[in-house]
Amino acid sequence: MAREMVAPFHETQAWAEPETERREALMVSGLSKVFGSEQVLDDVSFSIAEGESLVLLGHSGSGKSTTLRLIAGLETPDGGEISLSGRPIENLRARERNVGVIFQNYALFPRMTVAENIGFGLRIRGVRKKKRKEVVDRLLALTGLEDQRDKHPSQISGGQQQRVAIARALAYEPELLLFDESFSALDPQTRVGLRREIRALLRKLKIPALFITHDQEEAMELGDQIAILNRGRLEQVGTPDEVYNNPQTEFVATFLGAANVVEGCWRDGFIALNCEQCLAAPRPSPHQTMEQVKMVFRPEDITLGAPTGLVETPYHLGRGEVVDVSFAGATESLKVKLQPRGYIGKLAPSQCGAAADQPCDLVIKVVRTKWDARRLRLAPGDKVSVGLRSYKILRG
Amino acid sequence: MMPLVILPLASIFIYGFTKGPTHFWEALISPAAISSLKLSLTTSSVTTACNVVFGLIAAWVMSKYEFKGSSALMIIISLPTAIPTAVAGFALLLLWGRSGLLGQFLEHTDYQIMFTTAAIILANIFVTFPLAFGVIKPALDNLDTSYEDAAETMGASRWQTFRFVVLPSLRGAIITGALLTFARSIGEFGSTIMVSGNLAMKTQTAPLYIYAKFTEGDVEGANAIAAVLAVISFAIFSLILFTRKRLER
């Protein structure tokens, strides 16, 4: 698929139409499903705009496969509505929904050739052989599979099988494509390459798509939007940037990349962390004094500096001691134990939070680039000054 | 093991040729003998065709649908193999015979089921039904449902899914089931002798011919057809093994 794309399959216009409003291709609202006594999905709602892709991200058992099967029509929901291009489909049979599904094991019909697999959707719709061949040829070219047209699925590689699965789904011009963890069976290198190709292909054809995965890196690369599912409930929906840098819940914060979640207590414009570090907090704020809060910041939001001075960051967490250092190629991962009542910048310790010589065991994860690591070499036992570039306060 | 299995089979061929190949050949091409072979082949073929179709339908229903009493139904379907064939034949007589449960309604018509070819076929279908079913159902159970799911999401109706996706995958089981049914059916004796009336040239299948000739004292006659049946059975089982191997690639 590195070759030049032939004319797009759908007759799209050569000039771009001005984007008026975000038109919804798929809309899911209040979707619920119970299996036996277990509430597998609880009030899930999201939408996918035309030409957009959304990734459903979550652990196994979080309900993402169930959601896909409900949208495809392979299961019936216990509650909620699904509409595609404006028409409600939750009561339609799978074969009436005009949706394309790429299964985890691709489900290519083993006794048919690649070309026959791709043409299947047209064959059962009564399309004549000649027209079928035209469409199949076009799709084979689009997915770079011309040399495989007469082979059987068992004779081609995993990456090629997935391309056949996609071509097969595209043949009958579905209004939505559903990918059921379809990259999980591939080796990492093929996976990354194929992801990019598919992304480019979907953009070109402007078909909305829903991906399911438990791999957060994959989610961030594949989706225009990411929806995070946790035990059947939707935790947050947003762009990869929104979801990564502005997590609404602790689950979202810790699921997407590493995160430091610290509890503290709000005191008149400051957050007193459990180790008596204080953070100047943005004003005004919705929080009440003495209210418990949880704050989150990412390992890369921390800057470390020499212990005798303040790092040039908006916030500070006082001083700490390096507990662990590990080399990870482009980055360096460290664990730093914050010292109680360390240097807090302009604030005197007594101005902040309660008393005592509490033993402090707040260890935070820090990530530095290779160059920062070279500028200030650190080993376990070294003292550092800890600066914080940004943080978020989680609800609940 | 060898003496138990090989010797009886060998003796058919050894004895058959003791009086020379001409005698063997003459016994073989006698009209009654040929007629019995033809009848056996015909009834077995019809039985096989019917039971493969019935087996497919039954396997599909049992496999795809869950309903109360399905396990009881499974047992009932497998019963014919447990019943002694003479009992099966007798039961059919009771049902279809002149004063039988259903047969009495046919008394006044020109139709008579017992002592005709139809009777032989009915008896065979009953006795061999579990065979094709027993091979097709496990194969159906083992089929990955993702293929059917894929076909359905692509817009295929239930029939189209069955025809293009399920049936080709069942090819091996269908062929094996058909061969098993045919082999069993061609050798069926107990139920056939009860319902057919054993009329030479009319309702006398090959196994019945062997029995008739032997009781008459015409051992050569019996021997010739016995040899043919043995060869046919041997050929069928070789086919079964061969097909199984080929389809396992």
Image (cartoon, coloured by chain):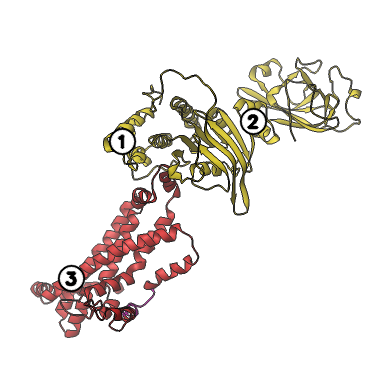
Chain colours: A yellow, B red
Residue A375 vertical placement versus A267 (above, below): above
Give the chain of mark 2.
Answer: A
Residue at x 29% of width, y 34% of height? A131
The residue under label 2 is A257
- In which image quadrant can residue A66 be found? top right
Q: Is residue B23 visible?
A: yes
Magenta: main secondary structure: helix
Residue A212 appears in which quarter of the rendering? top right
Question: Quadrant where the N terminus of chain B lies?
Answer: bottom left
| Circle 1 residue | A132
Residue A9: horizontal and vertical position, in percent?
A: 38, 28
Residue at the spot 32% in from the left edge and 61% down from the top edge? B53
Rendered location of residue B144, percent (x, y) = 44, 50
Q: Which residues are magenta?
A: B81-89
Question: What residue would you read off at disc 3?
Answer: B37
Q: CA distance from mark 1 to mark 3?
A: 50 Å
Name the amino acid type tagged 3: Leu
Q: Numbered disc 3: what chain?
A: B
* Magenta-colored stretch includes residue B87: yes
Q: Position of residue A374 (x, y in %)?
A: 67, 17
| Other-residue count near label 2 (Cα within 10 Å), few / some / many at <14 / 14–19 / ≥20 | few
Q: Nearer the viewer, mark 1 or mark 3?
A: 1
